[in-house]
Image (cartoon, helix red, strand yellow):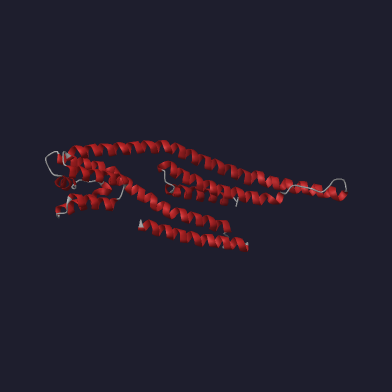
Amino acid sequence: MKKEKIIFYASAAIAAVFLSLGAMLFIQKTTMGGLIPLDFIVAGIAAFLVGPGMYDLFYRRKIKKMEERFPDFLRDVAESSRFGMTLADSIIVASSGKYGALTDEIKRMAAKIEWGVPVRDALLSFNERVQTPLINRITAIIIKSNEAGGNIADVLSMVARNARETQLAEKERNIEMFTYGFVLLTSFFVFLATIIILNNSFLPEMGKAGMAVEESFRKAALAGSLPGGGIAYQYVPIISLLFVLATIIHGIGDGVMIGILSDGRVKSGFVWAFLLLISGYFILRFLGAV
């Protein structure tokens, strides 16, 4: 959590610098090295999203890898317990196996037990270091079952089976939610294509038509045959800018929604929001829509 806070505050500070530069350039109505104020504003938003988003992404992946191998460890401990070993001896024997990201933590727990630390304290220490929802729940069950006595092997087998079923159900849910996420991605890029067509084809033609109509009205008014009038074509750049702002908001909103659909957390969508924001704005900037 300390690392997460440091990354969050660092990202917020960097974002504040970019946003301040963008605001200053906007007030002064100038550019910096060919970069317009909106470039700095988008960079600030992107900086705020990418730091916490990437940390959360790697942290969640680490947790997922640990939780995927924990049922294997429980199964090995249960098998050792069936031969009459105590829970402490079973953990020590099972610690010789390979459990991916959990291997070092399991070996550390087994080493503490070998040094004479009670099983309960070793499990609690292991739980504090790992800190994942699934392992928190299972560790509490193991400690209570061991204190209550009885056949710990059956309890471990049941818990391992339940954990595996929970993980399979979560994978199925993620696959189902991916469909909705794909719909959001498709809708964003369809919206982006629409904005590009409007900015590159429709709005320039509307501007030209407005200028032509205004010129014809002006000539007619000078001749005294028609009253003056025209189309407010000067608002075309403002409309184009509003389309770009809508793309930015659309990208951030869709990215956050993808995260919420994936695991119910806003922070999970920060990376998606960053990718959609940068890709959408870069495309518009490259095509001259900004």
**Residue at coordinates 53% horizontally, 42% vertically from top-left?**
189
Res 31 seen here: no
Residue found farthest to the right: 224
In the displayed structure image, the side of residue 101 where residue 190 appears, left or right: right
157 shown above or below 43: above
**Residue at coordinates 46% horizontally, 61% vertically from top-left?**
13
Numbered marks: total: 0
x, y (%) of residue 166? 31, 38
In terms of image quadrants, where is residue 174? top left
**Residue at coordinates 33% horizontally, 49% vertically from top-left?**
62
Residue found farthest to the front: 148
In terms of image quadrants, where is residue 158? top left
Res 154 seen here: yes
Decide which of 179, 112 is in the foreground and name it.
Answer: 112
x, y (%) of residue 126? 24, 51
Decide which of 22, 265 is in the foreground and name it.
Answer: 265
**Residue at coordinates 44% horizontally, 45% vertically from top-left?**
259
58 shown above or below 149: below
